[in-house]
Amino acid sequence: MTALEERIGYEFKNPALLKEALTHSSFVNGKNHHSNERLEFLGDSVLSVVVSKYLFENLDMPEGQLTKLRASIVCEHSLFPFAEKIKLGEEIFMGKGEENTGGRHRRSILADAFEALIAAIYLDGGLEAARAFILPFIPPLDVLKSGRLLIGDYKTILQEIIQQNPEEKVIYELADESGAAHNRVFTSNVLLNGQIIGTGVGGSKKEAEQNAAKEAVKLMGYETN
């Protein structure tokens, strides 16, 4: 059993799945490996199903509130500390360029790897194994009920503000993408009825969109942390 398997309390029957989950795209170039991007896609869905079922069974809330809570749990803002808790950054296979520019501590890389790890566990041991891994990371019910978890998930907060006026429409657009392949910088705009109301920069599209939403929320007169 590897050190990571000991930390997560799960031993893989197929170690190749674990290796794939830990392989960043920067490590693949010229090597006979698969990156974790496809597993990340699957892990996102598995995480959503497990969290949705848990919230449905434990919280007597309207659909809208459950949706916001789920979004705040499965977003990059939350997944990053989950990944840090199990020291996932220490285990990721990545190119030297990515590592030298702080890749092992980059929010987007760790959050994506966490989702890929969920998928690997799901494929190796089934839904119950994935559920057993995910549930300890879900915040206590008193925190979920209080709404404190939503702090930092600015896309959800902005959507909640906009929904007060059903005719309003918010979309996110990628404005710019620059930097070397191992150190991309993304700039995103958030538009309300076609007008830019916020711009954000980040190491991933998700982070850039969150920062754009944060700026929009602040400009609307709401407090941000």
Image (tube, rainbow, N blue to C red):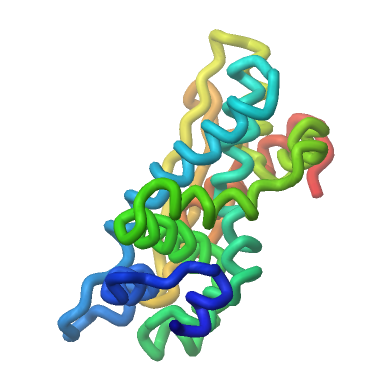
**Which quarter shows the N terminus?**
bottom left
Q: Say if 140 sits above or below 133 in the image.
A: above
Q: Say if 46 sits above or below 180 in the image.
A: above
| Residue 133 locus on image (x, y percent) | 53, 57
Judged left or right of residue 192, residue 123 is left
**Total tally of numbered discs in the picture:** 0
Residue 4 visible in the current orientation: yes
| Residue 220 locus on image (x, y percent) | 75, 30
Judged left or right of residue 55, residue 181 is left
Residue 218 visible in the current orientation: no
Residue under the point 57% across and 66% down = 83
| Residue 81 locus on image (x, y percent) | 65, 63
Corner quadrant of residue 30? bottom left
Corner quadrant of residue 92? bottom left
Residue under the point 78% across and 34% down = 147
| Residue 124 locus on image (x, y percent) | 32, 61
Corner quadrant of residue 213? top right
Residue under the point 52% across and 84% down = 3
Q: Say if 2 sits above or below 61 in the image.
A: below
Judged left or right of residue 1, residue 7 is right
Asked whether 158 or 45 is in front, the reply is 45
Asked whether 186 or 17 is in front, the reply is 17
